[in-house]
Amino acid sequence: MFEKILIANRGEIALRIHRACRELGIQTVAVHSTADADAMHVRLADESVCIGPPAPRQSYLNMQAILTAATITGAEAIHPGVGFLAENADFAQMVQDHGLVFIGPSPEHIRIMGDKITAKRAVQALGIPTVPGSDGPVTSDEEALDIARRIGFPILIKAAAGGGGKGMKICRNEEDLRTQLPVARSEARSFFGNDAVFFEKFLEKPRHIELQILGDGQGNVIHLGERDCSLQRRHQKLLEEAPSPALNADEREAIGQIALKAMGTLGYASAGTLEFLYEDGQFYFIEMNTRLQVEHPVSEFITGIDLVREQIRIAAGGKLTLKQEDVRFSGAAIEVRINAEHPETFAPSPGKIGEYHAPGGPGVRVDSALYSGYKVPSHYDSLVSKLIVYGKTRNECLMRLRRALEEYVIGGIQTTIPLHQKIIADPDFITGDYTIHWLEHFMERAAAAKDAGGA
């Protein structure tokens, strides 16, 4: 086992990794920008190194600075967390080239799955179903029209190197396609430095289902069940739950077996997530995240398996100690992402935390680096807390989440807590009847109702 690990991230995920390390008896090194000098993970780590100014490219994306920090502190491994360099194959390779261990999959697997077109081809070869679409990048307007007519409108244009909804456009007819294709290419070039785009059939009412897997690269792979991540705004997740209220036992078993066979063939090592669109009983692969997910705690709650500890054990050369038949699923868990944003306009709300009180009690977990007096910086993602609750049934989980949100006090800034309170009180959510488009319609109805009330 490692003696010292450098955590190349910030916020709640850096604190989450620190806690797992300390429970394994491992010392931690925190790296931080000047804006995060007083962050909780910096305060609790055994050592800390400032790696640059607030701008991510000069700090958390500064590979040389991070590797230098690992060298001077004597760290043996680097955990990239989520975001920033977590899915950067070049960084993973650099870590290995410097004689350190990257706590994650191989650079090769990161590279394969990092490009959506390459990933789609790879999983098709492994027997995983995909959304009907183009076989590769669309190179001309003529080819675009031919493909669109073949798969049928509506279609979705996606950036090959993208994510987070950037460069993504829905086209319902040929006129839309002519208008949106150059826009999508321009956005892809701007955000990712690559203007390659591809097409997929646009599904009208899908769920976003993802499957958590663990592999040790030694032929052993398990899955920890699915998470339903359908509650999204502009392709950004706001709430996740496990198990999905949309799946039955046979569907759950079927997709699990497909994933196990595919990842075993690939020889995958570390944690990873296969993401699917699910509609009318069919699963369609959309992408794989070769890292820890923000929503991993819901899988931990229903299985009792610590994903970060397992990541570290696998990176240290350990084998999985569980077989699939040993994984036990129990109860239901829901995570809400609490962002430093206005709950209606989603305008960012950085600032100094005043009164702070986190909820507690049975089945309640708060992953957050907030404390009273902490200044939420404006330079990074607005996620400031994850509230995760567990119940023996989904209904018990919902009631516990309602109670926990009532208890949660974050003073000094605006947060999305009021939005979550409204969402979980809606009859559609209570019955589990929602798709990836549901939240957008919910927000439109709420805005219309407010305007009508003001009139």
Image (cartoon, grey):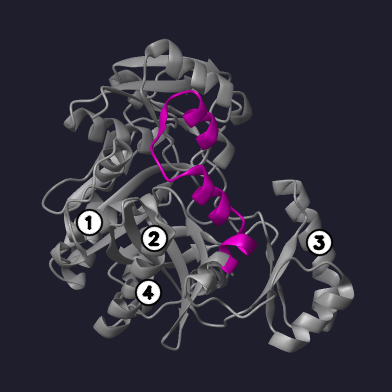
| First reached walking from the N terminus: tag 4 or tag 3 | 3
Q: Position of residue 70 (x, y in %)?
A: 43, 19
Q: Position of residue 348 (x, y in %)?
A: 55, 43
Question: Is 341 left or right of 401, judged from the image as shown?
Answer: right
| First reached walking from the N terminus: tag 3 or tag 1 | 3
* Residue occupying the point 77% across, 50% down: 189
Marks 1 and 2 close (CB-CB < 8 Å): no
Q: Position of residue 264 (x, y in %)?
A: 36, 62
Per the image, the residue denoted by label 2 is 239
Say what amino acid the circle numbered 2 marks. Leu
For residue 389, the mark is: 1
Query: CA–CA distance between discs 4 and 3?
Result: 36 Å
Question: Is 234 left or right of 104, judged from the image as shown?
Answer: right
Question: Which type of secondary structure does the marked residue at label 3 adopt?
Answer: helix
Per the image, the residue denoted by label 3 is 183
Q: Quadrant of residue 323?
A: bottom left
Query: CA–CA distance between discs 1 and 4?
Result: 29 Å
Say what amino acid the circle numbered 3 marks. Val
Question: Which type of secondary structure does the marked residue at label 2 adopt?
Answer: strand
Front of the two marks 3 and 2: 3
Per the image, the residue denoted by label 4 is 258
The answer to whether residue 26 is magenta is: no
Query: CA–CA distance between discs 2 and 4?
Result: 26 Å
Quadrant where the N terminus sits is: top left
The answer to whether residue 113 is magenta is: yes
Question: Which type of secondary structure does the marked residue at label 4 adopt?
Answer: helix
| First reached walking from the N terminus: tag 3 or tag 2 | 3
Query: CA–CA distance between discs 3 and 1?
Result: 41 Å
Say what amino acid the circle numbered 4 marks. Ile
Tell me which segment is drawn in magenta.
92-121
Query: CA–CA distance between discs 1 and 2?
Result: 12 Å
* Residue occupying the point 76% across, 47% down: 190
